[in-house]
Image (tube, helix red, strand yellow):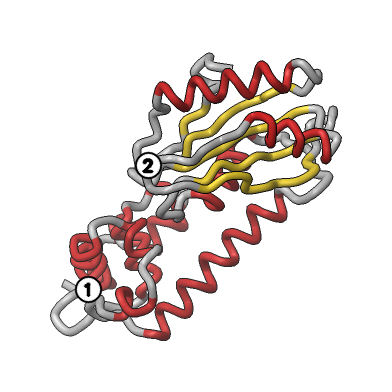
Amino acid sequence: MPIPDWPADERPREKLLKRGPQSLSDAELLAIFLRTGVKGKTAVDLARELLTEFGSLRKLLEADMKQFCQGHGLGTAKFTLLQATLEMAKRHLQESLKRGAALTSPENTRDFLTTRLRSYQHEVFACLFLDNQHQIIEFEELFTGTIDGASIYPREVVKKALSHSAAAVIFAHNHPSGITHPSQADKQITEKLKQALALLDIRVLDHFVIGDGKAYSFAEHGHI
């Protein structure tokens, strides 16, 4: 049955307008992006097929052009549209956390760090440097590693914090496996960094582990 013949509450566009985008499933969101289906399939049917084909919405969104265009009903036009949409989302988050902006929303911080780090196929350790009003001084990716981990050197972190005259920091690193729960090594290095920076009266406000789903916050779990 064509989507226009569905009950109004079940049509993705009407559902989004009435209940908000958070109420839609991955398939429904993707269907709105696709706009149309293919012969014998609605946009929602095609979206479900693509999610199964790629394995998840994230994998579809992060596919390169060759992989993306091999998907049924996809092509360079939709790939271009997707890349423009993703870049606008990144710039929106970057603008909300631009230099001099105060960190008033934990969720904005989480979303920004997730957007910056989640797509890496290797581990990356990054830091937000803040002044004493918790305004952003700089965001830097400090260390990179293999798919298994990154070597993190407290001395280098301290040097960077001093060079920025930071009063506080927020750490973040990604887990390419997608698992957000911190490892014992993550907890140990966080404690080492916290102790090293405390000697200079620089506070560690949080450490986010980025993977699939919601990023893990050390502060929310009482580890900071």
Q: In this view, does 118 lie to the left or right of 87?
A: left
Quarter holding residue 36: bottom left
Q: In which quarter of the image is the N terminus?
A: bottom left
Q: Position of residue 205 (x, y in %)?
A: 66, 25
Residue sitting nearer the eye, 203 or 104 = 203
Q: Nearer the viewer, mark 1 or mark 2?
A: 2
Residue sitting nearer the eye, 38 or 112 = 112
- Residue 220 position (above or below residue 67): above
Identified at 26% across, 66% down, the residue is 47
Q: Is residue 53 left or right of residue 150?
A: left
Identified at 48% across, 21% down, the residue is 187
Q: Is residue 203 left or right of residue 31?
A: right
Residue sitting nearer the eye, 18 or 220 = 220
Residue sitting nearer the eye, 45 or 75 = 75
CA separation, marks 1 and 2?
Answer: 41 Å
Q: Dot 1 surroundings within 10 Å: few (below 14), some, or many (20 or more)?
A: some
Looking at the image, tell me whether mark 1 or mark 2 is earlier in sequence order: 1
The residue type indicated by label 2 comes to Asp
Q: How many numbered dots are placed on residues in this image?
A: 2
According to the image, label 2 marks what residue?
148
Identified at 69% across, 31% down, the residue is 155
Q: In which quarter of the image is the C terminus?
A: top right
- Residue 116 position (above or below residue 129): below
Quarter holding residue 41: bottom left
Q: Where is residue 178 in the image (x, y as percent from the top left)?
A: 35, 43
- Residue 194 position (above or below residue 166): above
The residue type indicated by label 1 comes to Thr
Q: Is mark 2 on a helix, strand or loop?
A: loop
Q: Where is residue 31 in the image (x, y as percent from the top left)?
A: 32, 67
According to the image, label 1 marks what residue?
42
Which label sits on residue 85? none
